[in-house]
Structure formats: C-alpha cells, structure tokens
C-alpha cells in the first residue's frame, strides 16, 4: 500500500496501458500511433485545466468556476473575433489569458482578503460567470460562419507532426513542472497545503499564495476558453457546462489530495489522459456515450478510495518488533 | 558587559478586548540564554509572534544590532537574523528534511530556479555538523518528534540567525532528548547566538539559562541573573503571590479492584499490558513521552480496539467499541490534547458539560435547558470554575479552566473510573493545585483514578501505585512508598543502575 | 482574560439579553430583506399581490428548500452533499422505469423515496465507513447517480405519470395552499424541532464544532453523520417525487444545478460552511427570499439564467458584507483609539 502511494504515477500509467491493451485486443486500430495522438490532442484542454485546478487544490481550496470562466472568456473572444475579424489570433489569446486571470483573481481576492471559504466563493462566481455569458451574448450562439478561418485553424496547424493544441498542452506541462519543482512559488503551494500554520512562520503569505493559485488557474481557464471555442467551433452559454467536475475528477484520479499538499504534474496529466482514453474508447467498443458520466463517477470514487489508503497515516510505532515490519 | 544584540522597548499589543502586551522590554545578549518566564496568558507567545513578524506591535521599538527595525512579515524577521523554534514543531511532514531546512531561502541557480543539489548538500553538511544522524532526503514525517526538533535547529542555523527563540522546546521531549537539546544549546551559545528560552520548568531554566525575564498579565515584572536569584523569588514574581507546590495530603482508604486489564496488545503500539486499579486509588502511569501510555488509555476508553486481551470492570468483562460504550460502562477519559480532544471550542460551557449526559437531562430525546444549566452549575462550581456565565464560549477560558470544564463534563456522568492523561500539562500553577486537590477529593469519594503523567513530582506526589512503561510495555508496577525519583527515571529510560550513578 | 477577573459564587446561565440578541441576529436581518423584497415585488408588478401569484411563487422554492433543510444539518455537522440533484435524477428515472412496468402511485412514491434513502446511505457509508472526504465522494456519486440515469434513459424521457401521482406536484390541499407547501412547512417544523430541541440536534452542533472532541465525549460521530446523509437522501427522494409529479416527465438532466441552489439557501440562511453554526429558521427565510427574488425577476421577464447571477451575487454578498463591515469597524476603532 505504501508503495502504491509512492509510485502512484506508475500504477496509473499501468492502468492506462491495461485499458489500451483491453480495447486494442478487440479493436487493433485503437492503439495505432495516429489514434493515440488524437486521444492526446483531445485531452489537451482537460490537461491544461486540470493543471490549473491542481494548484488550487494543493492549497486546500477548490475552484468550481473554471468551466464557467472558460465559457465566459470563450464567448468574449468569439464575439470579438466575429465583430473584428482583423484582430490577430495571438492577440486574442493574450486577451483570453488576461480576462481568465482576472476572473480567477476575483475568486482569489475574495478568498485572500475576505477569507470566504473557496467552495462558497466559486459556487457563487460559477453562477455569476455563466450568467454573464448569457447576458453578453443575449443567449445567441457564435458559430463557425462568424469566426475567422485563422481563429478556427490556428490550433489545428501541425508542427513537427502534432497539432498546435497538443503543443500548448506540452508546453504548459513543462512550465508547470518547472513552476512546481523549481520555484519558491511552486514550493509554497505545497507548503501551505501541508501545513498552513508552519507556512506563516516560514514567511509565506498564505492568502497571497492562494490568490496566485486562483489567478493562474483562471489564466489557464481563459486560454482554454479560446482553445475550446475554436476546437468545437461554437461559443454558447452551454459551453463546458458541468465540466468543472471533470476537471476535479482528473485531479483526484491523478492523485491530488483534496486535503491539500499532495499532487504532482505527472499524476494530473495521467489522470486527464485516463479520462481521455475512456472517452475515446467508449464509442470504439460500441458502448453508448451515455455511459461516460457513470464511468468517470466510478473512477473518481475508486481513485479517492485508493488515495485515502495511500495517504493513511500509519499509527504510532512504539513496539520495537513492529518497527522492523 | 557588551551591548545586547536585540532590544525591545515599550512594546504594546492589544487584541479586541484584551491587552496582551503592555509596554514590555527585553534585552538579549550574544552567547547567552535568557529565559522568558510567565504563566499561561502572560503574553509570552504574543511577544514571540511580535519578534518574528507574525504580529505588528501597536507601540514600541525593536532594536537589532543598534538599529531600529520593523518586522512586517516573518520573512523580514529572518532577514534581520531572528528565528524561532516553536512549541509544536511547525514544519512540513510531507516534505523532505532538506526542503524543511531551506524552504523560503533555498539556494538558486543562475536562472533563479531552486538548486536542489546544492540544497541537499548544504543540508547534509549542517545536519552532520550537529551529529544529528538524519538523512536529508527522507520525508519529515518519517522522523520522531525529537529529530524534528533537530531539523528545526538546523533550519535556525541555515538562515544564520543571530537570535534564536525556543518556545517551550522540551514540552514534548523525553529526558534523554532534552539532554541532547541542552548540548545543542551550548553549541549555539558558543557560536555567539542570543537565545530566548521559554519554559514552564524551573529545573530547565536553572540548568540552561543565564538571565531571566518574568512576565505577568502582559507586563514585565522582573528580570535579572539566574545565579543571583532564588527559585521562590521567581515564582513569586510570576504569580504575584507566594505559592508552594504542595500536594494534598490524603489517607488512603483503598477498596476492592474496580478495573482490571489483562494482556492488552496492539499490533504496533503496546503489548501485554496488565494492570488493576482499586476503589479509592490513584494509579500513576509514568514513562517517557511516546512510551505508549496514552495509546493504552485510549484503548481502555474504546477509541481503538486492542487485538487481544481483556478488560474487566467490577467483575464483568467489557469490550468497548467506542468512547460511547466506555462512558456507558463508567470509564471516562480526560485527554492530553485539551484543545483538540477535550473541549468543543465554539460552544458554551454548559453544552460542553452536558454533552455526554444529555440522556439524563433530556426527556424522551427532547432537550430541557433548565436541567442542563443545573447540571453544569453543580459540577463547574464544585471545581471552582472561573467564568462570567455558563453560556461563555469555552475557547475564551484559560487552559486551566478549560481543563475544569472537561473534568466537570465527566463527573456529571457519575463514572466509576476516571483516566486523566497529563492532567496539568500547560496549565498555570493555581489551576494545577486545584486539579490536584480535586483528584484527592474524587478518590476520597470512592472513585478510581488512573493518572498518566510525565512530571515526576506529580507522579510521586499523587499516586498510590505507579506503573512504569517503556516502548509499549509495562516495565514495573511499584508501590509509592519511599520511592526515589531516580528509580522511576532509570526504569522509564531503560538505563542500568551503574550507568545512572 | 475575562475569566480571571470575576469570581462569582454562582454562575449565571447567561449574561446577554435573549430578546435583543434574537432581534439583532442574522435571522432578524433576513426577515428585513424578505419584507423589503416583498414590497419591491409588489411595486414592480401589479400581478404580484394576488393569492394565486403568491401560491405559484411557493413552487419556486419548496422542492429545493426540502433538500436545504436536511443539507443544513449536514453542513452544520461539517459535511456536504453535492449529489442531491443527481439523486433526484436517479430517483425520478427509477420511478419512470417502474412506471413502464405498470407501477401505481404508492409504488412510485416508495421507489422515489427509497432510492433517495439508498443513495444517501451509499454516500454515508463512503464518508463514515471508509472515512473519505464528503466533498470528493459526493462529486463522484453525483456523476455516478446521474450517469446511471443517462445509461437508462439516454436522450429519451419517461412520460405518462397517473393523475393520482401528479397530485403530489400539482395538487392543492385547501384553497391556494398546495400539497408541496404543506409538506415543506411540516418538514420545516420537524427539522426545526430535530435540530434545535433534541439531543440529536445538540450532537450535530457538537460534531460540527469539533468532531474529534465530540467522539472523545462519547458521541457516536460516524453513526450520526450516516443518519444525516440518509436524511439528505430521503429529502432528495421526496423532492424527486414532487418535481417529477409537477413536470409530468423524467429526463436525465432533471434538476441540474439544484445542488448549488440548495447549498446557497443553506449558506444564505446563516449556516456556517465550516460547520457548527446555523438555524432552520434562517434556512426557511433564505428559501423564501430566493423564491421571492426569482419570482419577482420572473414577473419582470428576466430570464432564468440571469436570475442565477443574482443568486450567485447574493451568496457572495451575504457572506462578504458582514466581513467587510467588521473590517471597517475595526479600522475606525483603531483610528479613534
């Protein structure tokens, strides 16, 4: 059990491999490199969102507003593109990051300055942000015909054999890995999750660190707002509805402890990929996509049971003979 | 005499309704240990937090090396060379030892990224210099509490502090570990550090400190050199009146066996535990911290289930599966961790007291407040609880008064056996005497008391018989007649007779 | 350090004036807000002050408020259940499924309520038996329960509930007083007594304030929490019966987002999201306020999703305002000192 806790990424990787083997045994085309790359590309957005959510959960918080943030920034950028097709896409993307970060920072300020529990804050902003999508769009959709071809095609551009969308996920993963392992900010996300009191004594500003987590998560949600809208070529009030739970599911399956302080970039990526493989496998093995929700629900429950076993504190070891075991 | 490294002058700090510090001053000298002495609530921890940048003083100045400094954050305090080692080690269980030492001031490479390799090497160097025998790469949670203290000391060394504050560093340590800590303090002194040592224990203060400063009710009431001052003088400054630590006289009228444990065992915590406590008896459990005494008591109280062994209460075998079962049977437990396990903070006194007795005060499941108030009043007044009303939130009470609430809660259930785990840990001298007095009253009324204590005077002063535990096993059970303290220490620490001499 | 100053021979029960503290409480504030919104509504629309309008208004909140009653106890105990809306979906789906086999009204109701209790017990077992955090468990069961509805129904729906069943969601007991409203008022009274007048309620508060100390005080914490999850499931099952009867059909997306509205009611009602504090009176008032707000905005033809902005903003504001007020007062107090 201890080994499982330590090498959780390996076990998760094996589970994914097993899944691939089972599906491939019946449908050999499933494991073809091209299909695997497609799965990766399909999962890219989830990976980026889950990385952002990981920061928040590490600090003993939770962000339920990420999907609504994504929908709102997605709608803003789609409407901007429809109104001013001339604005270059990279500028639009920068705009997304800024707006998303702003929406995340709003959550962060409420958590930091007013000490409102994060679940309440983001429950509130979830409904506000999604309501605002309706308000600014008046309930209308922005569809493919209204979007510029650059807007739609940028993320589909293939570079070194991979679409840019996949590259975004890869770059995000590398940057997050550097952030989490090599920077004081990254380490302080862990520190305040492990022991908030000790963090204060170590000179870490707990509130500001949480604020940073929410802001970075918001920035990721904003960037994904553009990626989502251009990938599915539609912006509407319903975009990514309920997706906040899928993001949290990816984190939990990836071994992030909801109690804070535990979680790695690798685990979260695998957690997202696990869900991605399932989603892609269902139609292949001819199971109705309506099974998807129940399966991810079961996966969350299974993961949280395993997490809890891995994290369970061993009782105090007092007896000499027990120490040897 | 050189100038002090650190000087506080006229420091005041208020919280809503409380004046925690009132114009206090303090000087710390290089290479000397200054003891900060005071009862709970005298303002010691507020002062520590002010010195480490957690709190901002309302008035007053902090001088370090002849310059006035402000300490808006914990970071700025360590920047001027002030660091603290806290009561409960405030470190990070899930992180490695090396990172615990360097969190917040980790070495960076030329791109500003954390340089793990250098960090590990430096951590190893510091730990080796202390002869700590700790691998910097293991997670902190793998270490025992004494080793965690060493990591905290290593952290203090790594930030090159001039002033080291030790906030009750020995509270959770065994005698042997305390001796090791003294050696480290000597090292720090030789290194020219100024040390502020906060403690309740006079033997420690006289052993290690050069100077002392006494606080009472947020004010400085005295200071001086330890070697020129008698213990009784300091006590008098602390409490503002003379107090002798005398344990109540009692004539033992001990009856038949009430509770008997036979061969209780647990896979990792204790083995083959057998003892019996009789009517009207105080049975002391002595041992080093972590000897498994609390674990045994929590098994008797039903919080954990022993893997084998039996409990017999008044001739009937019982196997409590929960605390509720134990209370029903007549066994109650006053836990060591008062704030976490004893009182329910956020709730008023009377609700705390009536909680386990609700079945008595209610009528067919419906609350009767008048009965609850009456019950709470009966038992809290008997314990001379100091409070403004029964609806006062227990979190606003002092430690000693919180302990009285916990004891009142259990007395109201009319128990047969009451287990007290470190009953006077961290409470002021006045409350301590009250608790001791009360224990002797309880046994006089025919209750059986089991008292777990790590304080030698308390164990020797209160117990009729003493069980000594070491590493999860009972070493010996002794009649408390003419026992020498050295005997108990030797048994508890497992030191052979000739070595101890 | 108030405890060291006075040594009264006899400790008084309490020092504050109970009447004054009731008036100045959160509930007192909620009453004012409710009255204010009521007055605004009657100015905003001439159709508001009409017994049938007011009766319609109650349908806006009774079903969610039923869940909020049990959720309040659960949150006071320090846990949360995010799966309540999914329980409604599953209960409704199973009722519709049984309908295909010719189940009559009593059987349908039994299935709806029974499913609710079973789902609640499942949550309770995972949280108390396996000692898992309730927020993740119920995020998981939320997907699981609604996922099962999707597996059974796909994009189909169940229709054709008998009229005797529809009465639960559409019938009136007397004049304009609907069965839903009566059921809600009865349940509110029961929960009020349960939480504020019984040993069980007292233990719920104790657990919410400090579950370890409660356990050490002989309270059966796991059992109490298990019962609370079952109660929440029961209320969700009852809400499923009412909602299904009112709509006359079941889709897997039924009651989507209701968990958030129920929690908003609870928090707006003054229950601390951290556990240990809150009252049923507050929750009932909060339910009424939310019903008034949504109905009033509906009279002004504001679409539902825009109303949700108000609900979300209300949730944050009611928690933020007292905090801001306290901060502002502290700042002025320091300045004048």
Image (cartoon, coloured by chain):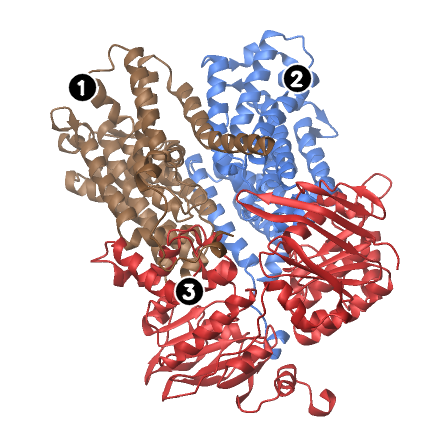
Marked residue chain, label 1: C
Between the residue at mark 3 and the residue at mark 2, the CA separation in whole angstroms equals 71 Å
Q: Which residue is mark 2?
A: A92
Q: Nearer the viewer, residue C117 or B240?
A: B240
> Chain C appears what colour?
brown
Residue B57 numbered tag: none
* Rendering colour (chain A): blue
Q: Element under label 1? A: helix
Whether residue A7 sits left or right of residue C153 in the image: it is right
From this viewpoint, is residue A266 visible? no
Label 3: which residue? B384
Q: The C terminus of chain C lies in which quarter of the figure?
A: top right
Give the SS element for disc 3: loop
Residue at image point 71% right, 69% down: B205
On whether disc 3 and disc 2 are found on a single subunit, the reply is: no
Mark 3 nearby-residue class (10 Å; few <14, some 14–19, many ≥20): some
Q: Kindly indicate which chain is depicted in red in the rendered structure.
A: B
């Amino acid at each position: 059990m201890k080994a499982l806790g330590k090498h959780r990424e390996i076990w998760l990787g094996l589970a994914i491999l097993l899944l691939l083997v089972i599906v491939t045994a019946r449908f050999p085309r499933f494991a073809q490199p091209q299909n695997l790359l497609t799965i990766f590309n399909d999962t890219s957005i989830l990976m980026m969102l889950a990385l952002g959510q990981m920061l928040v959960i590490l600090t003993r918080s939770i962000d339920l507003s990420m999907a609504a943030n994504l929908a709102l920034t997605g709608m803003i950028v789609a409407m901007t593109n429809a109104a001013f097709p001339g604005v270059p896409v990279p500028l639009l993307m920068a705009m997304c990051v800024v707006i998303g970060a702003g929406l995340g920072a709003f959550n962060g300020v409420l958590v930091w300055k007013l000490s409102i529990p994060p679940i309440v804050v983001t429950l509130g902003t979830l409904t506000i942000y999604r309501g605002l999508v309706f308000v600014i769009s008046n309930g209308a959709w922005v569809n493919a015909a209204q979007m510029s071809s650059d807007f739609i095609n940028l993320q589909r551009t293939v570079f070194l054999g991979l679409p840019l969308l996949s590259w975004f996920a890869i770059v995000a993963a590398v940057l997050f890995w550097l952030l989490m392992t090599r920077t004081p900010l990254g380490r302080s996300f862990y520190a305040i999750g492990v022991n908030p009191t000790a963090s204060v004594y170590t000179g870490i500003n707990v509130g500001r660190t949480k604020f940073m987590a929410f802001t970075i998560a918001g920035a990721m949600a904003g960037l994904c707002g553009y990626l989502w809208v251009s990938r599915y070529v539609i912006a509407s009030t319903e975009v990514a509805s309920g997706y906040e739970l899928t993001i949290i599911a990816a984190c939990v399956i990836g071994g992030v402890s909801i109690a804070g302080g535990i979680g790695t970039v690798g685990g979260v990526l695998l957690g997202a990929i696990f869900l991605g493989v399932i989603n892609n496998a269902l139609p292949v093995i001819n199971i109705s996509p309506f099974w998807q929700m129940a399966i991810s629900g079961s996966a969350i429950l299974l993961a949280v049971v395993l997490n809890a076993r891995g994290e369970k504190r061993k009782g105090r070891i007092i007896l000499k003979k027990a120490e040897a075991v | 005499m050189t100038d002090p490294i650190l000087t506080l002058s006229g420091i005041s700090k208020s919280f809503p309704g409380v004046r925690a510090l009132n114009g206090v001053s303090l000087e710390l000298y290089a290479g000397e240990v200054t003891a900060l002495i005071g009862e709970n609530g005298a303002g010691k921890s507020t002062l520590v937090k002010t010195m480490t940048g957690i709190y901002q003083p309302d008035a007053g100045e902090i001088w370090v090396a002849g310059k006035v400094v402000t300490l808006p954050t914990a970071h700025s305090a360590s920047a001027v060379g002030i660091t603290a080692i806290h009561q409960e080690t405030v470190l990070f269980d899930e992180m490695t030892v090396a990172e615990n030492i360097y969190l917040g001031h980790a070495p960076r490479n030329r791109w500003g990224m954390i340089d793990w390799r250098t960090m590990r090497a430096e951590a190893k160097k510091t730990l080796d210099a202390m002869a700590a025998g700790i691998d910097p790469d293991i997670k902190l949670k793998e270490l025992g509490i004494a080793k965690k203290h060493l990591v905290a000391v290593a952290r203090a060394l790594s930030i090159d502090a001039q002033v080291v504050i030790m906030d009750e560093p020995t509270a959770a340590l065994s005698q042997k570990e305390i001796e090791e800590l003294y050696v480290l303090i000597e090292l720090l002194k030789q290194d020219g550090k100024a040390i502020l040592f906060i403690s309740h224990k006079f033997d420690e203060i006289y052993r290690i400190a050069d100077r002392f400063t006494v606080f009472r009710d947020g004010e400085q009431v005295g200071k001086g050199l330890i070697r020129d001052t008698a213990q009784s003088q300091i006590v008098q400054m602390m409490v503002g009146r003379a107090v002798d630590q005398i344990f109540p006289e009692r004539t033992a009228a001990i009856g038949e066996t009430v509770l008997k444990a036979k061969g209780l065992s647990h896979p990792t915590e204790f083995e083959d535990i057998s003892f019996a406590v009789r009517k009207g008896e105080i049975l002391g459990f002595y041992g080093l911290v972590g000897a498994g005494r609390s674990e045994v008591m929590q098994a008797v109280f039903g919080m954990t289930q022993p893997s084998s062994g039996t409990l017999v209460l008044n001739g009937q075998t019982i196997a409590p599966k929960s605390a509720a079962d134990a209370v029903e049977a007549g066994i109650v437990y006053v836990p060591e961790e008062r704030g976490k396990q004893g009182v329910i903070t956020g709730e008023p006194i009377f609700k705390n007291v009536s909680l386990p007795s609700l079945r008595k005060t209610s009528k067919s499941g419906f609350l009767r407040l008048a009965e609850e108030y009456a019950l709470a009043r009966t038992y809290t007044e008997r314990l001379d609880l100091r409070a403004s009303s029964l609806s006062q939130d227990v979190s606003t009470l002092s430690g000693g008064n919180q302990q009285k609430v916990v004891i009142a809660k259990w007395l109201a259930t009319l128990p047969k056996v009451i287990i007290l785990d470190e009953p006077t840990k961290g409470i002021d001298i006045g409350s301590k005497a009250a608790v001791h007095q009360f224990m002797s009253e309880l046994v006089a009324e025919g209750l059986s008391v089991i008292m777990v204590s790590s304080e030698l005077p308390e164990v020797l002063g209160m117990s009729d018989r003493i069980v000594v535990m070491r590493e999860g096993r009972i070493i010996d059970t002794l009649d408390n007649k003419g026992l020498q303290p050295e005997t108990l220490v030797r048994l508890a620490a497992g030191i052979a007779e000739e070595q101890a001499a | 350090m108030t405890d060291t100053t006075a040594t009264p021979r006899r400790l008084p029960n309490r020092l504050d004036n109970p009447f004054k503290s009731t008036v100045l409480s959160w509930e007192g504030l909620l009453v004012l807000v409710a009255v204010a919104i009521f007055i605004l509504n009657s100015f905003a629309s001439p159709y508001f002050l009409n017994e049938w309008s007011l009766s319609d208004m109650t349908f806006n909140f009774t079903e969610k408020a039923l869940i909020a009653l049990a959720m309040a106890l659960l949150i006071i105990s320090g846990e949360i259940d995010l799966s309540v809306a999914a329980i409604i979906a599953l209960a409704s789906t199973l009722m519709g499924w049984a309908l295909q086999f010719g189940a009559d009204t009593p059987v349908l109701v039994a299935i709806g309520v029974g499913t609710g209790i079973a789902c609640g017990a499942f949550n309770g077992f995972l949280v108390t038996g396996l000692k898992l955090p309730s927020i993740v468990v119920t995020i998981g069961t939320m997907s699981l329960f609604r996922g099962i509805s999707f597996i059974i129904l796909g994009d189909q729906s169940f229709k054709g509930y008998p009229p005797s069943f529809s009465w639960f969601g559409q019938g009136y007991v007397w004049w304009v007083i609907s069965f839903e409203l009566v059921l809600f008022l009865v349940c509110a009274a029961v929960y009020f007594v349960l939480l504020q007048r019984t040993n069980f309620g007292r233990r719920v508060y104790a657990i919410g304030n400090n579950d370890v100390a409660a356990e050490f005080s002989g309270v059966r914490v796991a059992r109490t929490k298990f019962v609370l999850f079952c109660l929440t499931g029961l209320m969700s099952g009852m809400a499923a019966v009412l909602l299904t009867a009112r709509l006359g059909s079941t889709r897997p997306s039924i009651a989507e987002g209701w968990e958030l509205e129920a929690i908003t009611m609870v928090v707006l009602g003054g229950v601390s999201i951290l556990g240990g504090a809150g009252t049923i009176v507050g929750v009932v008032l909060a339910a009424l306020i939310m019903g008034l707000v949504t109905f009033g905005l509906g009279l002004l033809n504001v679409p539902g999703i825009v109303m949700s902005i108000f609900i979300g903003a209300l949730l944050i504001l009611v928690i933020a305002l007292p905090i801001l007020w306290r901060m502002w007062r502290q700042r002025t107090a320091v300045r004048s000192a």
